[in-house]
Image (tube, helix red, strand yellow):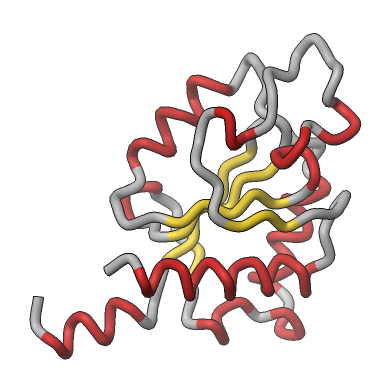
Amino acid sequence: MSDLLQKIVKKSPWIYRINAGSCNGCDVEMATTALIPRYDIERLGCKYCGSPKHADIVLISGPVTAVVKEKVLRVYNEIPNPKVVVAVGICPISGGVFRDSYAVETQLDAYIPVDVNVPGCPPRPQAIIDGVAMAVEIWKTRF
C-alpha cells in the first residue's frame, strides 16, 4: 500500500454495531453518538457502516444470549483484520443484570477478544465516544 493511501486509511475507520441480546438501552446511546451533533462520532474520523465486511471497529452490546451467540460469532468473523472490539455496556463485560439468566451464555470475552470495555447501564454517549477514541488508537497500531 502506498504511503498516501496508508495515511488516508488510518484516519477513517468504519464502525459496525452488533446487538448480542441487549435490552436496547446501549443501542439507543450508540445511535446518539451518530445522530446528535453534540456527540458527533464523525469528528474522530469514524463512520457507521451497514456491513461487517467494511468495518474496522465493532461495537457489541448486550449479554451473549444462547439464541444469538452463533450469529454474533459468524458476523464477527466476517469483519476483516485488523479489527478492534469494543464491549459497550456492562452486559457484554459481565452479563449485567441478566448474568444468572438461563438465556445468557457468559461474558463476551469468553468468545471474542475484547480490546476496549465501556461500562455503564447504559453508558453515557461521552463514555462511548471515549471508548471509540481508544479503539481508533488501537486500530492505528495494528497496521
- In the image, what residue occupies the spot 86% across and 18% down? 100
Q: Position of residue 133 (x, y in %)?
A: 58, 75
Relative horizontal placement of residue 71, taking residue 128 as reference (left or right): left
Task: From this view, report whether residue 107 is shown above or below residue 140.
Answer: above
130 or 138: nearer the viewer:
138
Task: From this view, report whether residue 66 is shown above or below residue 31.
Answer: above
109 or 44: nearer the viewer:
109
Q: How many marks?
A: 0
Relative horizontal placement of residue 41, taking residue 8 as reference (left or right): right
Task: From this view, report whether residue 130 is shown above or below residue 79.
Answer: below
- In the image, what residue occupies the spot 67% across and 72% down? 129
Looking at the image, the residue that sits furthest to the bottom is 4
Q: Toward which corner of the image does residue 91 lie, by quadrant?
A: top right
Looking at the image, the residue that sits furthest to the left is 2
Task: From this view, report whether residue 142 is shown above or below residue 20.
Answer: below
Q: Position of residue 121 (x, y in %)?
A: 88, 49
- In the image, what residue occupies the spot 76% across and 69% down? 127
Q: Position of residue 118 (x, y in %)?
A: 72, 57
Looking at the image, the residue that sits furthest to the top is 102
124 or 28: nearer the viewer:
124
Relative horizontal placement of residue 68, taking residue 15 as reference (left or right): right
- In the image, what residue occupies the spot 61% across and 77% down? 41
Q: Position of residue 120 (x, y in %)?
A: 85, 54
Image quarter where the C terminus lies is: bottom left
Image quarter where the N terminus lies is: bottom left
